[in-house]
């Protein structure tokens, strides 16, 4: 393209000065440079790097990021919980495999009584909320599904993740509280039927849920063998940073605008996980779930 422009410019048309030719060529070069610059920017946006592969077992992997301004504003209110560090962690040794398998059975047992018409279903042991076609129902009103052992395992795993977050961010454990929503999720490749099925949009947990300060995910299936697609993606400025789910893998991060993220669409198979959320605000804390026979209905 440049060669053609030069060859045409080498024989000026009558009445056109060399100064005008140079000016036009200058504009062409500016256009080409701009196209190259913006083209590479788009390429950079599409870049993806893997933070944690499903094929590797990680005792701990972390990455610190800059905290946003609103985080520092909240530190005045919650100094024992917001310690001035923002970042993300992946750990594969916090939860035992038998515990993860038990939680998977809980999810499967509950979700078989419902399930979304689209590609994303949820089960919340705290409220009993269960996806059912295009709405939600209360599983505790339709089935006697769970045992005390199920709730004991749930609580034990939650406590392990709570401890891991408190230790990693150097906070006082009693300053961190469980909050809602905390739920099991099942994702597959079905076409979305409602907005609740569209899990692939970029979002920020603190803006979506309000109460979140720390988000954790425990994966209950394996990327590459149980499903394809469905990776967790942090949207960083330089590149998208992916976490590949692995059975028993715990991933947690600060929930503010420093961590926009999404989940890729599941292409095949079924992806299971549990989101366990934490807050610094005691007014937004929730208790551990209990069996209906012990007071929940």
Image (cartoon, grey):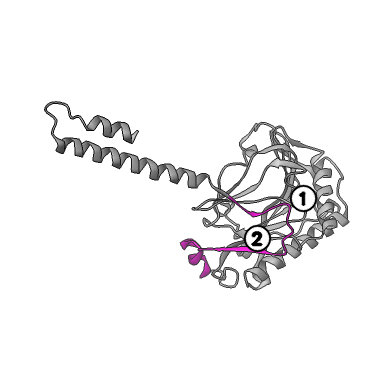
Disc on res. 220: 1
Q: Nearer the viewer, residue 93 or 285?
A: 93
Q: x%, y% of residue 175?
A: 64, 70
Q: Nearer the viewer, residue 8 or 93?
A: 8
| Horizontal side of residue 261 vs 19, given as left or right | right
Mark 1: few, some, or many residues within 10 Å (few <14, many ≥20)?
Answer: many
* Mark 1: secondary structure: loop
Q: Quadrant of residue 81?
A: bottom right
Residue name at image x 75 percent, y 64 percent: 160
- Horizontal relation, residue 139 to residue 263: left or right: right
Q: Is residue 149 above or below residue 4?
A: below
Mark 1 and mark 2 in contact? Answer it, CB < 8 Å.
Answer: no
Residue 200: image tag: none
Q: Residue furthest left?
A: 15
Which residue is at 81% across, 38% downward? 113
Q: Nearer the viewer, mark 1 or mark 2?
A: 1
Name the residue beneath numbered marker 2.
278
Measured as percent of width and height from the top left, residue 145 is found at 86, 46
Q: Within 10 angstroms of label 2, few (less than 14), some, or many (20 or more) residues?
A: many
Q: What span is in magenta?
A: 49-76
Specify whether residue 35 is painted magenta.
no
In the picture, the quarter occupied by the N terminus is top left
Q: Is residue 281 placed above or below 123 in the rendered structure?
A: below
113 left or right of 16?
Answer: right
Image coordinates for residue 206, horizontal then vertical, percent = 56, 55
What residue lies at 29% left-to-right and 42% top-to-bottom? 30
- Residue 29 falls in image quadrant: top left
Judging depth in this view, the residue of 156 and 142 nearest the camera is 156
Residue 164 place in picture, x, y as percent: 70, 66
In magenta stretch: residue 63: yes
């Amino acid at each position: 393209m440049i060669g053609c422009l030069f060859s045409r410019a080498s024989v000026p048309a009558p009445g056109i000065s060399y100064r005008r030719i140079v000016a036009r060529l200058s504009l062409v070069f500016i256009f080409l440079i701009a196209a190259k610059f913006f083209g590479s920017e788009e390429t950079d946006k599409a870049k993806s790097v893997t933070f944690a592969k499903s094929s590797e077992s990680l005792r701990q992997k972390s990455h610190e990021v800059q905290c946003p301004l609103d985080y520092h504003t909240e530190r005045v209110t919650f100094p024992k919980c917001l310690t001035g560090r923002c970042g993300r962690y992946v750990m594969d040794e916090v939860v035992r495999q038998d515990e993860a398998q038990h939680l998977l059975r809980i999810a499967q047992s509950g979700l078989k009584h419902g399930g979304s018409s689209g590609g994303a279903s949820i089960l919340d042991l705290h409220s009993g909320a269960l996806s059912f076609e295009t709405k939600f129902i209360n599983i505790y009103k339709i089935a006697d599904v769970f045992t005390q052992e199920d709730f004991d395992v749930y609580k034990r795993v939650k406590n392990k993740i709570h401890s891991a977050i408190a230790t990693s961010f150097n906070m006082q454990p009693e300053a961190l509280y469980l909050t809602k929503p905390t739920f099991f999720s099942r994702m597959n490749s079905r076409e979305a039927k409602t907005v609740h099925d569209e899990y692939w949009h970029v979002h920020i947990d603190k803006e979506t849920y309000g109460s979140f300060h720390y988000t954790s995910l425990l994966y209950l299936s394996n990327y590459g063998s149980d499903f394809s697609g469905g990776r967790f993606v942090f949207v960083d400025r330089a590149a998208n940073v992916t976490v590949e789910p692995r059975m028993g893998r715990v991933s947690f991060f600060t929930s503010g605008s420093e961590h926009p993220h999404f989940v890729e669409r599941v292409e095949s198979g079924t992806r299971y996980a549990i989101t366990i959320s934490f807050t610094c605000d005691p007014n937004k804390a929730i208790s551990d779930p209990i069996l209906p026979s012990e007071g929940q209905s």
